[in-house]
Image (cartoon, rainbow, N blue to C red):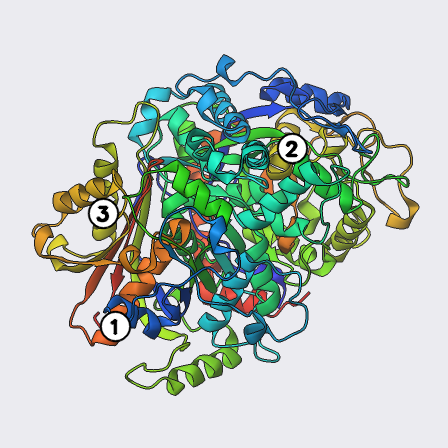
């Protein structure tokens, strides 16, 4: 019986723990730029401006704002024809990203009992939620909602579907912190891996652009005029750095194969294999009814300082920042002030703006910022070593991650 | 390999020192506990939305709730109903813990809040507005209230917390996910103190959805009963304040119970049908993490929704771990209905109270235990039973196959003076016994279900 005899180590102010670095071994990304990191890099470098019309809804249903939808997505290309009929588009985006990240369907016999999912969302599938809520108003009887649609309305539906289709039986969490959700999911994953809750996690974010979402964000305000509204999914395969590869021999073979198959130039789209490390992820809250003036900037600056310290990185070593707030009226200033407060030559540090290219993707933004950083590094054969991903929400959430380029440690 | 070889996550002991409850049977932990012990029901005809045309009209609503009566900082009207439940429960938990609220913003403290529907009543309001006036008529101030993240944000805002505010929308096991993640933050030294729990609001869409799945009971919720007919949708908010044992002792806090550990996994088979083997595996994960064996579990607070499938699957899963020596297993959903994202948090509360005050929580409304559940099922029918449980196991399962189980242990205050000695000895044991993360994964991976 151990109830009253187990260990108590330390008290008071939380002590930093060593470790906690995440190794990224795979990435699946879908955005207005197309599928995969190379398409994203191409778009970032201006080779192709991804301006498309929505295909899942009549364009006339959207507000008068520029849109950056994901190009037509046929989930059957990823999952086959069977069992896909009742999947909503939100889950389909996540499922497609999961298959890209994991390099294909689960290999026969591979044990994935300690591989899990940590998925960021703002509100889950608002398309499904809105449809069910509307049905209670317009159907002949108020309960005549589509029972096969109802399970899609729970916000963990996409994470559950990703588990089902990929055989991922480990920890399966869904995380919502608004604009910063994807970085919160990374933080959740880091904690879970550091505590041995899983050996490998698929972590990232999904955001779907529907007429209701677009109108909601349009009406809510906060974005610069003519800021494109975007959507997308970015998922990363992460493991604790320094640990043995998870998933047994089959997983090693799979990953080995996909790595080997990737040309050095990374020319093909859909290649899931990447390598980089997330050295630290810190998140905080600077909201509240009596939020301090400049509170968001100070809150993010605290996060940045903490994250750099925990990463063992000097502020002067930061080469690039994938910013998150650049098209938000009030938030861009807060993000910039935080960077100037913490980075000694902030003005000289390169900025990478994914929202400029993909539109603002709300809860998926942080994951797409990270994907953009990886895509950019991979495509440009960069000498950069350390990148930051920053995110600020008007609701008070602040977050940042410190990322280390492949082979830079 | 046997599950006990899986290493526990190392770290500080974590205790529950404050509880806040907003429920259909009372606000505050004392009122809630008294009602549950008495088997009092909180499910009545629905008043929060028009039920005309609904064949089933019962739910567990928090009636006459005015958040402004309880909140100190937030302006209630600026927040949705779920966020209000969360903020009030958090405020109550801090008052209950006897912590100076002014200090909360100066330490590494945050909140993790589970939910199923998020701000579901706000969504309904927006759906009605869109139906009436089109999407372009949506009011900005209502849209701002919609994101699920507002639930944990409300807790941080009300209390002035500067640490992470994570809402964890893992549906009907969400509070246990929240408690587990908060436990890891406190135990692992990432946070000094965390508030964790969940919140959800009764709403038309959820009620309609469960009805269409054939899962709603027409009158009351009767878990484990031969004539059980399903769930009743319900609402509430719950927050548990978690801090390291040493910090609690240093400030002379009242300790409700120790959070011994948790387990979480995913069925990865079906969105809505539970899987006994996977649940059994989750029980094993939780027990291994807590460092206790099946024979040490004195009570199970069941997920116990009252649907024929859930209860049969849950008992079958328990048998896989406990054999035919099942601990008493009861469901408080019998009294308060299914509070969704708050459900396993309210289960955690009643586990803490059972351990501290010495009773087994009852299954209300039970007439005859379903013989098809097999022999030896003791759902503690009617009212609470005096007992001295030492370890309680709290179940939470969800759509999406998201299982999470928390384990709580009685904290014995009379032995607290020996805690330092004991922890040193145990620290040494644990160092010898720890196999590290990789070995842990291998052990778990070999078990199968």
Left or right, residue B192 beside residue B136: left
Task: Name the secondary structure under disc 3.
Answer: helix
Within-10-Å neighbours for mark 2: few <14, some 14–19, many 20+? many
Quadrant where the image shows the C terminus of chain A = bottom left
Same chain assignment for discs 3 and 1: yes
- The residue carrying pointer 3 sits among few (fewer than 14), some (14 to 19) or many (20 or more) residues within 10 Å by Cα, namely many
Q: Nearer the viewer, mark 3 or mark 2?
A: 2
Q: Which element is circle 2 on?
A: loop
Residue where numbered disc 1 is placed: A47
The residue carrying mark 3 is A304
Which residue is under mark 2? B203
Image vertical order of residue A275 relative to residue A154, above or below: below
Q: Earlier in the sequence, mark 3 or mark 1?
A: 1
Q: Are marks 2 and 1 on the same chain?
A: no
Question: In front: A146, or B441?
Answer: A146
The span from disc 2 to disc 1 (Cα, nearest Å) is 48 Å
């Amino acid at each position: 019986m151990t109830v009253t005899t187990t260990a108590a180590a330390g008290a008071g102010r939380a002590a930093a723990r060593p470790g906690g670095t995440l190794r990224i071994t795979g990435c699946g990304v879908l955005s207005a730029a197309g599928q995969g990191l190379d398409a994203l890099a191409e778009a970032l470098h201006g080779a192709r401006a991804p301006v498309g019309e929505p295909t899942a809804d009549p364009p006339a249903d959207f507000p008068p704002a520029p849109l950056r939808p994901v190009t037509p997505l046929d989930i059957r290309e990823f999952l086959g024809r069977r069992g896909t009929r009742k999947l909503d588009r939100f889950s389909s985006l996540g499922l497609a990203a999961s298959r890209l990240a994991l390099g294909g369907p689960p290999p026969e016999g591979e044990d994935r009992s300690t591989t899990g999912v940590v998925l960021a969302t703002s509100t889950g599938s608002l398309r499904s939620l809105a449809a069910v809520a509307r049905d209670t108003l317009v159907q002949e009887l108020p309960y005549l909602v589509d029972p096969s649609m109802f399970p899609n309305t729970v916000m963990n539906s996409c994470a559950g579907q990703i588990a089902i289709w990929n055989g991922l039986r480990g920890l399966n969490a869904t995380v919502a912190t608004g604009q910063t959700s994807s970085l919160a999911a990374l933080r959740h994953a880091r904690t879970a891996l550091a505590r041995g809750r899983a050996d490998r996690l698929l972590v990232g974010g999904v955001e779907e652009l529907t007429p209701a979402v677009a109108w909601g964000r349009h009406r809510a305000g906060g974005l610069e005029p003519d800021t494109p509204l975007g959507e997308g999914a970015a998922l990363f395969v992460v493991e604790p750095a320094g640990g043995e590869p998870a998933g047994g021999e089959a997983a090693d073979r799979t990953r080995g194969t996909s790595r080997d198959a990737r040309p050095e130039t990374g020319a093909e789209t859909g290649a899931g294999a990447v390598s980089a490390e997330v050295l630290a992820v810190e998140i905080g809250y600077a909201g509240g009814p009596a939020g301090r003036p400049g509170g968001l900037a100070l809150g993010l600056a605290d996060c940045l300082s903490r994250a750099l310290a925990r990463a063992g990185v000097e502020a002067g070593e930061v080469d690039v920042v994938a910013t998150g707030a650049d098209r938000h009226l009030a938030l861009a200033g807060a993000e910039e002030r935080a960077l100037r407060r913490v980075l000694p030559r902030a003005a000289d540090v390169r900025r990478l703006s994914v929202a400029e290219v993909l539109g603002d993707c709300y809860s998926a933004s942080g994951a797409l910022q990270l994907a953009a950083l990886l895509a950019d590094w991979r495509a440009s054969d960069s000498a950069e070593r350390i990148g930051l991903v920053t995110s600020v929400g008007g609701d008070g959430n602040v977050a940042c991650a410190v990322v280390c380029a492949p082979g830079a440690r | 390999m046997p599950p006990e070889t899986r290493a526990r996550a190392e770290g500080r002991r974590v205790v529950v020192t404050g509880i806040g409850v907003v429920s259909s049977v009372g606000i505050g932990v004392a009122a809630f506990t008294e009602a549950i012990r008495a088997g009092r029901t909180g499910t009545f005809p629905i008043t929060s939305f028009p039920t005309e045309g609904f064949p089933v009209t019962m739910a567990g609503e928090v009636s006459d709730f005015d958040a402004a009566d309880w909140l100190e900082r937030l302006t209630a009207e600026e927040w949705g109903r779920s966020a209000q439940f969360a903020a009030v429960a958090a405020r109550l938990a801090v008052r209950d813990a006897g912590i100076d609220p002014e200090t909360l913003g100066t330490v590494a403290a945050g909140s993790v809040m589970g939910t199923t529907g998020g701000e579901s009543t706000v969504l309904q309001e927006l759906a009605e507005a869109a139906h009436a006036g089109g999407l372009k008529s949506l009011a900005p101030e209502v849209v701002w209230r919609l994101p699920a993240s507002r639930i944990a944000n409300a807790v941080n805002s009300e209390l002035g917390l500067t640490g992470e505010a994570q809402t964890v929308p893992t549906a009907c096991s969400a509070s246990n996910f929240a408690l587990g993640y908060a436990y890891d933050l406190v135990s692992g030294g990432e946070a000094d103190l965390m508030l964790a729990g969940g919140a959800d609001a009764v709403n038309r869409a959820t009620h309609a959805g469960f009805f269409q799945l054939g899962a709603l009971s027409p009158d009351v919720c009767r878990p484990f009963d031969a004539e059980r007919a399903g769930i009743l949708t319900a609402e509430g908010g719950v927050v548990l304040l978690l801090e390291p044992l040493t910090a609690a002792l240093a400030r002379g806090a009242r300790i409700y119970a120790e959070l011994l550990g948790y387990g979480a996994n995913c069925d990865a088979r079906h969105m809505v049908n539970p899987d006994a083997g996977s649940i059994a595996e989750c029980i094993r994960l939780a027990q291994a993490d807590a460092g206790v064996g099946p024979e040490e579990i004195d009570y199970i607070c069941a997920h116990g929704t009252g649907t024929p499938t859930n209860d049969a699957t849950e008992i079958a899963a328990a048998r896989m771990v406990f054999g035919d020596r099942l601990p008493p297993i009861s469901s408080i959903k019998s009294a308060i209905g299914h509070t969704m994202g708050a459900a396993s948090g309210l289960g955690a509360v009643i586990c803490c109270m059972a351990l501290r005050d010495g009773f087994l929580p009852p299954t209300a409304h039970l007439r005859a235990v379903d013989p098809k559940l097999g022999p030896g099922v003791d759902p503690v029918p009617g009212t609470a039973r005096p007992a001295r449980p030492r370890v309680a196991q709290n179940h939470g399962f969800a759509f999406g196959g998201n299982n999470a189980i928390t384990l709580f242990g009685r904290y014995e205050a009379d032995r607290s003076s020996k805690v330092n000695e004991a922890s040193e000895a145990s620290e040494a044991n644990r160092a010898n016994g720890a196999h590290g993360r990789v070995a842990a994964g291998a052990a778990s991976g070999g078990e199968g279900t």
